[in-house]
Amino acid sequence: MSGESFDIELDRHVAPSDWINPTPASRYHLVVIGAGPAGLVAAAGAAGLGAKVALIEMHRLGGDCLNYGCVPSKALLKSARVAATVRDAAEFGVEVPAGVRVDFGEVMDRMRRLRASLAPHDSAERFRELGVDVFFGAGHFTSPDSIDVGGQPLRFRRALIATGGRAAIPEIAGLSDAGFVTNETVFSLTTLPRRLVVLGAGPIGCELAQAFARFGSQVTLIASRENVLPKEDADAARIVEASLRRDGVEILTNARAVGVTQSGSEKQMSIECGGAGRGSTNRTTDELLVAVGRTPNVASLGLEVAGVEFDSRAGVRVDDHFRTTNQRVFAAGDVCSRFQFTHAAAAMSRIVLQNALFPGRGKGSSLVIPRCTYTAPEVAAVGLTEAEARERGVAVDVLVEELSRNDRAVVDGEAVGFAKLLLNRCTDQIVGATIVASNAGDMLNEITLAMTAKLGLSSLAKTIHPYPTQSEIIKRLADQSQRRRLTPFVKRLFARWFAWTGSGL
């Protein structure tokens, strides 16, 4: 099958052209607008409990995660990691034939094949079998308790807005005329651009900049701040930046694009560096990727009619229970939260089910939400960073363990990285953590569990980790904390004890 055939197979499941919307029920327990992670989890969960549920989707079921985000991007990143492994094979004593190259068309076909293979889980047919009434079309509120889709009114007891977000597009002179790609369109490329400019140095920008550089593109990454990944731990960001540069990515920091022109197939970008009047430069590119953030999808939903307050930048306004200013309507996911992750959206929708269908009082503030940027190495974090702790006036002790002291990381050739824990200075409760490692996202889970269950670091100190694993670094952090408790006073007590017990030796 070709890439086009895989896309047809994808649409057969998540956007079937022959789909006929059902006849609406007289009233639904829950109507969900948006079939991304939040919407799908809520619809499936409510139907599984026996509620009458309607699910409305304007484009493809699966949302960004399946179609334009997690699934296709991680498929690309895996291919990029393999390319880097082959490139560096000599470091491990493995000879690779000269002339090994990346077949970008095959990389993209693999991504589309895998995406299509996962589509049945999010398919319209599957959700119909679960008992959900699936409607394709643009849904909008017509009253505080009714939504129209394709001219059909759906009355509800409760509704969930789960319309997600889209790529934010900056106002740059000539950008629209010159053309660009975002996370929604970059996965439609079939030819590797010889030159690529990436605008934005957040997670998406860094991940794709590194991937395309490893595939062979000449990549320039434009960062508006003094470092990449500005929301992450500064030490972690520096390691990622160094890794990107090793892969050949040119990084312009404290820079912003001020204009774009097009000449034939080339785009010329004017870039201001270091602030107004401090200098400028130009870059010629074949493709431009815009990755400067996300904008919530709130337009054309009729939120005003429903009495739902919203902001075009911040999204739908919700309380700690994810209820909007209309007590019948809830929201979850990117459309209402700064935690714009698939797993966060799914967790929010489960709280919505508690609060919307039952007299629940689940709170968003109770969620401990981890995050991971899938560069090489990965940066995984949960809770506060050091900078955030200082800003909030939270007194913390900082524990750091370098991967260079971890046997498995050394023999794997992955010794650049660290694990950092922030402990409440008055207790041993973890208030934040950052791990920089090849598989940091997997390593972070036990710390997230400890924070969720309110287990102190002493509990992790008792946990036996298999040797040799990179996750042992967490045990070493816990041991480091235990050693800190060995104060001079405690040492004097121990000295007296051993002197007394050893007097008869």
Image (spheres, rainbow, N blue to C red):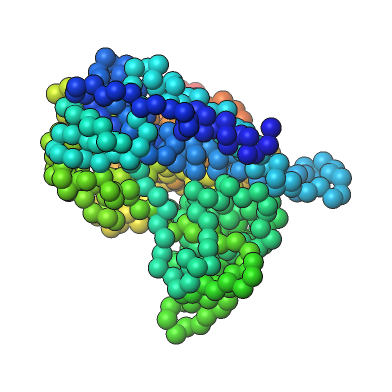
Q: Residue at x 25, y 18 (%)?
A: 51
Residue 333, quarter of picture: top left
Position in image of residue 101 (x %, y %) = 78, 49
Q: Which residue is at 28% across, 48% downward? A: 300
Query: What residue is drawn where x is 14% and y is 38%?
Result: 144
**In the image, residue 417 lies at what x, y percent?**
55, 48
Pick the front one: 419 or 267? 267
Relative side of 342 to 304, left or right: right
Q: Is residue 50 above or below residue 463?
A: above
Q: In the drawing, does residue 237 fall left or right of residue 495? A: right
Furthest residue toward bottom: 277
Name the outermost residue toward the top: 50
Q: Residue at x 29, y 26 (%)?
A: 54
Question: In which quadrant of the rendered image does the N terminus lie?
Answer: top right
Foreground residue among 273 and 400: 273
Q: Position of residue 161 (x, y in %)?
A: 27, 38
In the image, is residue 115 above or below residue 200? above
Image quadrant of residue 322?
top left
Q: Nearer the viewer, residue 271 or 468?
A: 271
Asked if residue 481 shows in the view, the reply is no
Label tally: 0
The picture quadrant where one finds residue 383 is top left
Q: Nearer the viewer, residue 191 or 456?
A: 191
Q: Position of residue 153 (x, y in %)?
A: 22, 32
Res. 19 visible in picture: yes
